[in-house]
């Protein structure tokens, strides 16, 4: 029996000004380096069921802020690039995907989507709550590096090892709480939630930093390897069940 590379759906943003769907190329490169075949999933795909029948894994990518109305939050002057169409689409897809056993990786905004889809809330602007002990983005358009601590005993620690590591960070929001069904996997030195892993879903991780930007960091790329290996195993399992 011949198996194809795992098909990895990756969500995209909408840029109305340029009439485009957009995704930074590092997401594609990271998926390819780990042996996956990337497929873009722009907002608006009407049949969520057909997406989840085809893909072997799904990445919720980074981007602008969620509309605070999606988590009963208030407006904040620092909230930017809200796109309600993308929010609606990704929140529905996330809720649906969490009910399947399809491997899920949320990155940055993707963590925020998974948190809100699971009934959690976000902090609208980190400096208001955590001050500036750790800088989580250089500017709105420029990332920064900071260290994070991966909690021993977590699934994430099994993949990339426990303890401190330096990551690319490009966010000004974060999970306010750990939503039901998830547990804490990593924090920054200021206490900001930097990673969550699902307690019941077989492979669902939500990561606030950008592992796809550390393409030369073998430790960070293990996240994509583990994700795509799991997607591959599931693909084999599903096709055996079908035959
Ligand atoms: Mn950060």
Image (spheres, rainbow, N blue to C red):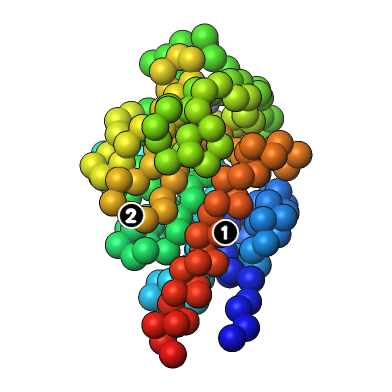
User: 218 above or below 139?
Assistant: below
Earlier sequence position, callout 1 versus callout 2: 2
Tag 1–tag 2 contact (CB < 8 Å)? no
User: 115 above or below 51?
Assistant: above
Depth order, front residue of 243/40? 243
The residue shown at (72%, 55%) is: 33
Image quadrant holding the C terminus, namely: bottom left
The residue shown at (69%, 39%) is: 218
Could you tell me which secondary element the residue under label 1 belongs to?
Answer: helix
The residue shown at (58%, 69%) is: 7
Mark 1–mark 2 Cα distance, whole angstroms, equals 16 Å
Label 2, ligand 1: CB separation under 8 Å: no
Asked if residue 120 shows in the view, the reply is no
The residue shown at (60%, 50%) is: 224
Kindly identify which numbered label has been placed on residue 201: 2
User: 110 above or below 240?
Assistant: above
Residue positioned most to the right: 216
Kindly identify which numbered label has been placed on residue 228: 1
Give the percent coordinates (x, y) of residue 17. 65, 53
Asked if residue 21 shows in the view, the reply is yes
Q: Is residue 5 left or right of residue 45?
A: right
């Amino acid at each position: 029996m011949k198996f194809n590379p795992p098909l990895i759906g990756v969500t995209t943003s909408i840029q109305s000004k340029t009439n485009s769907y957009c995704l930074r190329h590092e997401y594609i490169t990271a998926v390819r380096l780990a042996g996956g075949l990337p497929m873009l999933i722009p907002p608006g795909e009407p049949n969520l069921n057909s997406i989840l029948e085809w893909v072997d894994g799904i990445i919720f990518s980074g981007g602008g802020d969620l509309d605070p109305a999606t988590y009963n939050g208030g407006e904040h002057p620092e909230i930017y690039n809200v796109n309600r169409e993308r929010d609606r689409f990704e929140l529905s897809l996330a809720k649906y995907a969490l009910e399947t056993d399809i491997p899920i990786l949320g990155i940055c905004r993707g963590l925020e989507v998974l948190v809100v889809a699971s009934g959690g809330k976000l902090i609208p602007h980190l400096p208001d709550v955590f001050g500036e002990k750790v800088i989580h983005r250089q500017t709105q358009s420029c990332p920064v590096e900071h260290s994070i601590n991966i909690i021993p005993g977590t699934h994430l620690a099994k993949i990339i090892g426990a303890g401190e590591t330096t990551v690319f960070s490009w966010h000004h929001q974060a999970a306010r709480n750990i939503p039901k069904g998830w547990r804490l996997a990593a924090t920054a030195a200021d206490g900001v939630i930097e990673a969550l892993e699902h307690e019941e879903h077989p492979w669902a991780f939500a990561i606030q930093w950008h592992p796809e930007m550390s393409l030369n960091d073998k430790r960070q790329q293990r996240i994509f390897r583990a994700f795509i290996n799991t997607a591959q195993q599931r693909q084999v399992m599903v096709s055996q069940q079908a035959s």
